[in-house]
Image (cartoon, rainbow, N blue to C red):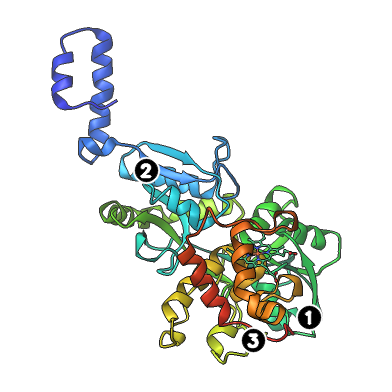
Amino acid sequence: MRANHSDIGVSRHRSISALLACAAAALIVQTSPLHADEAQPFRLCADPTNLPFSSDSPSQPGFYVEIGQALAQALGRPVAYDWYKSYFGKRTVRVTLLGKQCDAMIGLPRSEDFMGPAVIFSNTFAKEGYALVAAKGQAVGGIDGLRGKRVAVQFASTPQNLLASRDDIQKVTVLSPEEGMQALDQGRADVAFIWGPVAGWLNKTSYNDRYQIELTEGEGLSWDTAIGFAKTSTELRDRVDAVLPQLQGKIGELAVKYGLPTGAPARFGAVPAVATTGTGTGAAVTQVANVVATETKGDAAAPGAEAVGAGKEIFNGTCAHCHGPDAIQSERKIDLRLLRHRYGDEMREKFWTTVHEGRPTKGMPAWKEVYTDEQFDSIYAFLLTVQSESND
Ligand code: HEC
């Protein structure tokens, strides 16, 4: 309900209850420093089942949702939610935020390359990424601290790629952070190098806070997290940036409440090249990219660089999850660097039918409803730059 001063004036002489109502209305007007039309809800897009980040349960709303609530309060606006189960990260952003179903999306990777100019960002409010989980008192501190240890890594993740070339570190492959924590708990691993927020949440909710969790830093290991807006919302973004500093204390408390790794991250050096390619595009493609697809500026001069860059961005945002960042993948069956080796002249045709129709019984989704043919072309252009004769 909205109230303005003339409503209050008229209702004053009517009845006790109207008087009370108008007192309440006056209170709202007084405590809100902003204009009347700004009592419109601050609409957040969030995933209803994504703890520790967000949940539609009012008793445990999650880190992002509570930040949204604090922000709305600081802006003098009520909060409203658009729940959307995110499976395809960028697709969700396109449908919800860019589809104007909400005003802000909390917790996007702050990178110009995330969605291009369509999405703008607030200042950074947290850092998220992979973390080292170990028994308390066992600081690892860097890659050499893992020497001689059994380290649980998630299948096709940056940590797996990072450790792939280290013979002095024993890898225990797991499929999820949950399984990584179990490997640790059951003594099958000494350290788990897994997705930090979920590790922290499980440590808190299932393992009695038994482990210490160190965030890591390095290419593809962690990134800055911010609030995303559609590019037309610069005014709202600026107002959010203006109130963010006063919320930092609260955000710190929330991070602790939800078990998110805090403290200085352990620094990992440059990722070693785990593959070389036949096409000579060099370091740009052998480097393991950031999961959020930081563009490598070095190959900008190459022919078709724009399409390759766009394709790589889609690939790292959606396909890397199964096929590995930058298509670097140790499992031969899903190593897309072997497409030419495998199919020769039929490579393009195989690619085209597989990405359109998928192979549902084998775990490869169909993407024809998700991407345009132009986008498939760009993914293909990117894959051409990483073809190789072998994956070892
Ligand atoms: C949920 C996991 C998953 C995701 C996400 C995924 N794929 Fe796949 N993909 C698979 C699996 C598993 C196979 C192997 C299917 C088989 O055994 O035939 C596959 C096979 C393929 C193949 C055929 C490989 C060959 O040698 O025959 C191509 C091409 C491919 N994927 C492209 C993509 C692209 C492009 C994307 C992103 C738009 C993508 N995939 C996303 C799981 C996935």
Instruction: Say if 365 sits above or below 324 in the image.
Output: above
Q: Which residue is mark 3?
A: 272
Q: Gap between marks 1 and 2, in whole Å?
A: 47 Å
Q: Quadrant of the N terminus?
A: top left
Q: Amino acid at mark 2?
A: Ala
Q: Taking 98 as reference, is 156 left or right?
A: right
Q: How many tags in the picture?
A: 3
Q: Taking 90 as reference, is 183 left or right?
A: right
State the SS at label 2: helix
| Numbered disc in front, either 1 or 3 | 3
State the SS at label 1: loop
Q: Which residue is mark 1?
A: 169
Q: Nearer the viewer, residue 94 or 73?
A: 94
Q: Which residue is mark 2?
A: 72
Which quadrant holds residue 141? bottom right
Disc 1 + disc 2, Cβ < 8 Å: no
Q: Position of residue 223 (x, y in %)?
A: 51, 68
Work out whether mark 2 precedes mark 3 in sequence or the reverse, and give the earlier one. Answer: 2
Q: Taking 63 as reference, is 148 left or right?
A: right
Q: Nearer the viewer, residue 273 or 134?
A: 273
Instruction: Say if 123 sits above or below 50 in the image.
Output: below
Q: Position of residue 301 (x, y in %)?
A: 41, 88
Q: Residue at x 47, y 81 (%)?
A: 296
Work out whether mark 1 precedes mark 3 in sequence or the reverse, and give the earlier one. Answer: 1
Q: Gap between marks 1 and 3, in whole Å?
A: 14 Å
Q: Residue at x 70, y 48 (%)?
A: 205
Q: Amino acid at mark 1?
A: Ile
